[in-house]
Amino acid sequence: MLDIKDLQASVEEKQILKGLNLEVKLGEVHAIMGPNGSGKSTLSQVLAGNQAYEVNGGTVTFNGQDLLDMSIEDRAREGVFLAFQYPVEIPGVSNLQFLRTAINNIRQHRGEGEINAAEFMKQAKAKIQQVNLDPSFLKRGVNEGFSGGEKKRNEIMQMLMLEPSLAILDETDSGLDIDALRVVADGVNALRSPDRAVVMVTHYQRLLDYIVPDYVHVLAGGKIIKSGGKELALELEEKGYGWLGLEDNAESEA
Amino acid sequence: MTQLSSLAVVEAHQLNSALPSQIQTLQKNAQEKLSTLVVPTRKTEHWKYSAKRLGDLSLLSNNSETVSTTAFVENAIYIDISAAGIDAAALSEIEESGLTLQAFTQLSDEDCSAIIELAEYERGELEQINTALFNDGLVIRIAKNAVIECPIILNFVQDEAGLTTPRVYIELEQSAQATVIENYAIADVDGAFCSSQTTALIGDNAKLTYLRQNPLGSAFRIGGTTRAILKRDANFESHILCLGSAMARHDLHVLMTEKGSHCELNGVVVTKEKQHYDNHTEIEHIASNCTSEENYRCIADDNSHIVFNGRIYIHKDAQKTLGEMNNRNLLLSNSAEIDTKPELEIYADDVKCAHGATIGQLDEKEVYYLKTRGLSDEQARQMLTLGFVLELVRAVPIASLAEQWEQTLSELLSFKD
Ligand SMILES: Nc1ncnc2c1ncn2[C@@H]1O[C@H](COP(=O)(O)OP(=O)(O)OP(=O)(O)O)[C@@H](O)[C@H]1O
Ligand SMILES: [Mg+2]
């Protein structure tokens, strides 16, 4: 469903992605690991359509369409969802307010009618409980004054409401306590199905005990430099990134 | 330069002989003072941005009639105030334990002493006009320890051109509590000018919640002064919805005269087309250990113009003052204008005072976030614009009024096709 070929992207004149290849098929879960600053968030943001990143090479095909040519909102309506590494705080706009509009846009895009108000409320309450947040969070400003872990859970709550076909989770597990990690993992697993795919960026093998990936990739220096099964994550946990020859990579950069 | 005293409406004014003699004296003095005041121009202090909006005051006369308005908050006490005066008979029908409502004309000379004393604080052209010309006034008195649960709604009604000068005096005795809502129902016609004055004396440990809303207009002009005098441990909370008109001006003056008092001033200002709104606020910390918090948010669209002049004045004895003022502004169009001027004057040394003012556009990170959830650019911007002011509306303590304000604002800020 997602085919990334030779993707190159820069931010503020700095080349970050330098020919990245990745193919994700329906039903698969991919984990992306890699050192700080290697370009994991850049990849996530480029897929979501963040204009701050300039794509200067390569292609991304999503369900047969040119993803890079689509507007941010159309990507979302086609089923792309990004759980942000650093979710934005929006005081004054509540989850309830924008999720309803979001869901209706997505439904309209699919040629479906608007969601009924009672049904929407029922779902919102169910999903917020599913991520172990108090229902009062629905009415508060989006992420306003939420703790780090609450913000991450709120991202998952949104994901559960919007039911994307491609969920990209950028370090959703960072800063979570053990219970919250479970909650997030359960949320993702609930969404897992043969007609969806998940790409999750993480630094910790621990998450992969809960959400078992089909593939693990190492992103370093703007490229996927190694791919493998879930055992690759264990190997990384044990040995770090050094054995992959990252130093060489850094040198060639300089 | 035009002398205010030479305006036809001033010259034609006849003192209401039913008013207590002390009040008549106050008014005569005010009329004399008018002869030293001129119609504000750009050069007049505090009128820099708004003088040209005043219109031709020489055309004003004093001739409005009463119209009725509809209820908009449940379980509230409604009082209509028009140029025709205060309906004393209607006032006497309102029965609420601890609450006394009277027209100025019903007062004895002793009853007036606080009104006369507090007139000392008066200043500015609009206030002088009000004092010189009001026909009658309303007194709201809350007895010691009385908590008036139902909001008291003052409907200022003006259904045609002319000048109206509503006048209100509110007094809360020790540990009393009340909520007063000022609603302005002014016909949107050229030459309609309403200039109100409300003074509230808030006793020891008493609390006044004050709300004020005026309609959106293109022709009428409105000016008003609200002054709150806080005694020991008193509390004043105000929420003001400012919708633009041809000229709109509100002066809010808070005096914290004794230890331990607290005020919280919230204002939401929205103007469109060629509208205007000028807020001048001043918080005077006179006694020590008082706290003040002010939040005004303004949105100007089209060719409209908003002025915010917020002053915190900390007198030399006002040690241990905590003062915070925040003014944030959003410009929705290149031809809209917002002038903001926070002013701090501090004469005490042990104070914590912060102020900030920003003028800007929407945060693109927030727009982006909402778009990644499937909102269109327009939907995202509209939601964020509304959210910018709703943050303050959510603090309005009367739920049904907060809902109406939210409704009004969401209609006002929904984008044109
Ligand atoms: N908006 C930006 N402006 C300037 N530099 C940026 C911007 N966004 C990212 N970068 C830089 O691009 C590089 C890659 O950043 P990115 O956020 O993609 O890394 P990451 O792999 O997600 O790292 P982490 O594991 O720390 O989250 C970093 O050097 C970062 O400083
Ligand atoms: Mg990152």
Image: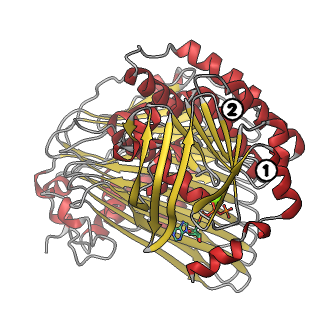
Which SS class for mark 2?
loop
Amino acid at pointer 1: Leu
Q: Which is nearer the eye, A11 or A254?
A: A254
Badge 2: residue crowd in 10 Å (few <14, some 14–19, many ≥20): some
Helix, strand or loop for disc 1: helix
Residue designated by label 2? B98
Query: Foreground residue, B417 or B345?
Result: B417
Tell which quarter ligand 2 is in. bottom right
**Number of residue marks:** 2
> Which chain is home to disc 2?
B
At x 40% / y 68%, what residue is drawn?
Answer: B123
- Residue in the foreground of this view, choosing between B302 and B316: B302
Q: Name above or below for residue A120 compared with residue B332.
A: above
Task: Please state if A147 lies on the left or on the right of B27 as rendered.
Answer: right
Q: Nearer the viewer, residue B91 or B275?
A: B275
Q: Is residue A44 visible?
A: yes
* Residue B15 in picture, x, y percent from top left: 29, 49
Which mark is in front, 1 or 2?
A: 1
User: Residue visible at 70% across and 21% down?
Assistant: A126
**Residue B288 in which image quadrant:** bottom right
Asked if B61 appears above or below B338 in the picture, the reply is above
- Neighbour class for label 1 at 10 Å: few (<14), some, many (≥20)? some
Real-space Cα separation, disc 1 to disc 2, in angstroms: 77 Å
Say whether residue A161 is left or right of residue B258.
Answer: left
- The chain holding disc 1 is A
User: Which residue has dot 1 on it?
Assistant: A232
Asked if marks 1 and 2 fall on the same chain, the answer is: no
Quick one: quadrant of the C terminus of chain A? bottom right
Residue B198 in view (yes/no):
no
Query: Residue A22: x percent and y percent?
Result: 55, 47
